[in-house]
Image: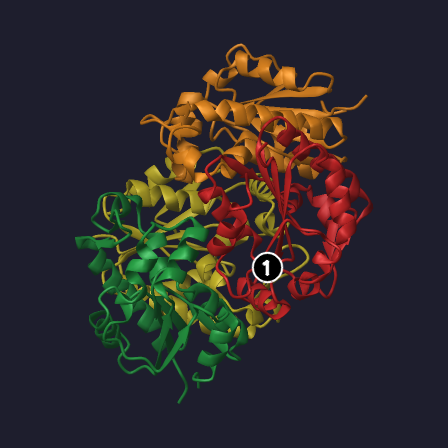
Chain colours: A yellow, B green, C red, D orange
Amino acid sequence: MGTDVIVVNGGSSSGKSGIVRCLKAILPQPWINLGVDDLVDRLPPALLESGAGISFGQAGEVVLGDDWRAIETAWTTGVAAMARAGARIIIDDVFLGGRTSQERLRGHLRGLEVLWVGVHCAPEAAAAREFARGDRPPGMAAGQAEKVHQGVVYDVEVDTTHAESLDCARVIAQHVS
Amino acid sequence: MGTDVIVVNGGSSSGKSGIVRCLKAILPQPWINLGVDDLVDRLPPALLESGAGISFGQAGEVVLGDDWRAIETAWTTGVAAMARAGARIIIDDVFLGGRTSQERLRGHLRGLEVLWVGVHCAPEAAAAREFARGDRPPGMAAGQAEKVHQGVVYDVEVDTTHAESLDCARVIAQHVS
Amino acid sequence: MGTDVIVVNGGSSSGKSGIVRCLKAILPQPWINLGVDDLVDRLPPALLESGAGISFGQAGEVVLGDDWRAIETAWTTGVAAMARAGARIIIDDVFLGGRTSQERLRGHLRGLEVLWVGVHCAPEAAAAREFARGDRPPGMAAGQAEKVHQGVVYDVEVDTTHAESLDCARVIAQHVS
Amino acid sequence: MGTDVIVVNGGSSSGKSGIVRCLKAILPQPWINLGVDDLVDRLPPALLESGAGISFGQAGEVVLGDDWRAIETAWTTGVAAMARAGARIIIDDVFLGGRTSQERLRGHLRGLEVLWVGVHCAPEAAAAREFARGDRPPGMAAGQAEKVHQGVVYDVEVDTTHAESLDCARVIAQHVS
């Protein structure tokens, strides 16, 4: 039985996107990606401006409003349904709640063969990359770098501090069946 | 009972994206959008280059490969599941098969309250907008302008040839409950 | 003697960019474009955040800081030098000072054969397009729609309220020699 | 006397853009950036499609057409004029001709205080980054990695193979007066 879903968890600016692009290019089967950023990009302006959806604090911390959880739950339910219907999906996520976030996602993905991937990056390196991008709230990268991995259990872990995305993707690909 | 899903169907460069952005900004409830272009953007390189997924002919016509239908079916199954789980979703689509495409989507959305919206645009106007964008295969807009509406039944229809996206969105919004 | 520079002046969301893309595609000679937005995109973060460069008021009005004029003068001097060195350049600009802005630019372009183009758009239409884009400060389009044309003298004027970019570009192209 | 121009030379995917963004953010004076990619982005479609401007070979090599040199010369003349008029400019370039390219640019910048910066990256690392981006012709990064530095003389050199853009920018900034 093959892998149905690859969950790639890591902090902001840890290098998830580059790894995901590489994975899609090197894996022999067709994989598509749908992550938490895709949902954020699709939120209506009211949810971004009011604090009811998602917003960002002074130190780059993410603040989730009342409406967020409802829409995220529906979104994730749908992503799981895509996978059950046969689409191979790479979910890139940021487990703000660490182990609690993983348990919630595990619940959604019940019955599916999931590969859990942790993307580590030294806080200083992630902060430097955040600075170089210039399009993320300052502080977010350092704040999330270690928090998102607390209590999370992985099948494979990579560290982008000194490794290229492609090399990390190759390590991950060996665990995809 | 309120509207669960808004399906916005129209040819390439007919103005769907602008209408969808306006709808998300003016509707009082939070709506997210997920369309066929979002799936295309997520396909792995192999499906785009090999002809197995989606490709484009000399006159801008869309060519769907063997792998496309399978992944699109899984994707649409998931989008419907999101809606059943409570997310309000605007699906922007291009019914290449006209009525047949609508029937297939209707099957996926069974049990949901759907508002079917047709976005018309005169072929010459759509072709001019395609030219001005400069990022679409030439010929696609004119080729799809009328074909995608053949045999399709709508709840509301708008025409962007001489109207702004915002005005079209206001007309559509009156039909959302 | 041929046209050296095409200056395209119009308010925000009046449709300048689409017209410029069309012009580059239909004119028989190679033209490149360099406009005020290109300079804004290249400003360092400090000039955007401090008010020393360019910033935006509550009603979408543009506020120019002390450092802006110096850097804009140097920029325009360079663009004029490119044209004198033989590059055909389309300058898309927003004459916030109307006639005064034109006189200043005319000074920079002395000795060059310039085609002055006015891009009009009804304030309500420009505001609707601004809303549909969703990426501009609200109010900017309506506030600039008429102001930027005050006292300005043109060789050719187009109105995008009811015309496609391509049709406007064709009218302009007839005046390029 | 202060630095007027910073020239950042390196192969495709060597990390120039990240370094330039960091430089603009950390240097105390306002700097703007204008590089060869900005000119390529502004070329009309005819020059990109015909081979008369710039095109790419099977192995990612850059092919420069007859019209390219003329327009690039005019462009560079203008960029130098901007700097002479007082704008501090970071030019990011790819010296396809190595030393010959540097000599040509040096001619344009005569009389200006120039800081010459070399951005090195191991060919395998640059190729891996090119793969992860997925938006560049394959082979370009490896093909340019060493070639662009042949015979070029620098004031400061950095290597992005194992260093973050921000750290490289800090080294460069110490040489800016």
Q: In front: D87, or B27?
A: D87
User: Residue B42 at what x, y percent from top left?
Assistant: 35, 53
Residue A146 in view (yes/no): no
Q: Is residue D36 above or below residue A122?
A: above
The residue pinned by badge 1 equals C13
Q: Is residue A5 above or below residue D174?
A: below
How many other residues sit within 10 Å of disc 1, few (<14), some (14-19) or many (≥20)? Answer: many
Horizontal side of residue A110 vs A57, given as left or right: left
Horizontal side of residue B107 vs A32, given as left or right: left
Examine the image and state in which quarter residue B146 appears.
bottom left
Q: Quadrant of the N terminus of chain B?
A: bottom left
Horizontal side of residue B175 vs C149, given as left or right: left
Horizontal side of residue A159 vs C136, given as left or right: left
Q: Residue at x 47, y 31 (%)?
A: D13
User: Residue D165 at what x, y percent from top left?
Assistant: 58, 33
Amino acid type at mark 1: Ser
User: Residue B153 at what x, y percent from top left?
Assistant: 28, 79
Identify the residue at the far top of this view.
Answer: D151
Examine the image and state in which quarter residue C61 appears.
bottom right
Q: Quadrant of the C terminus of chain B?
A: bottom left
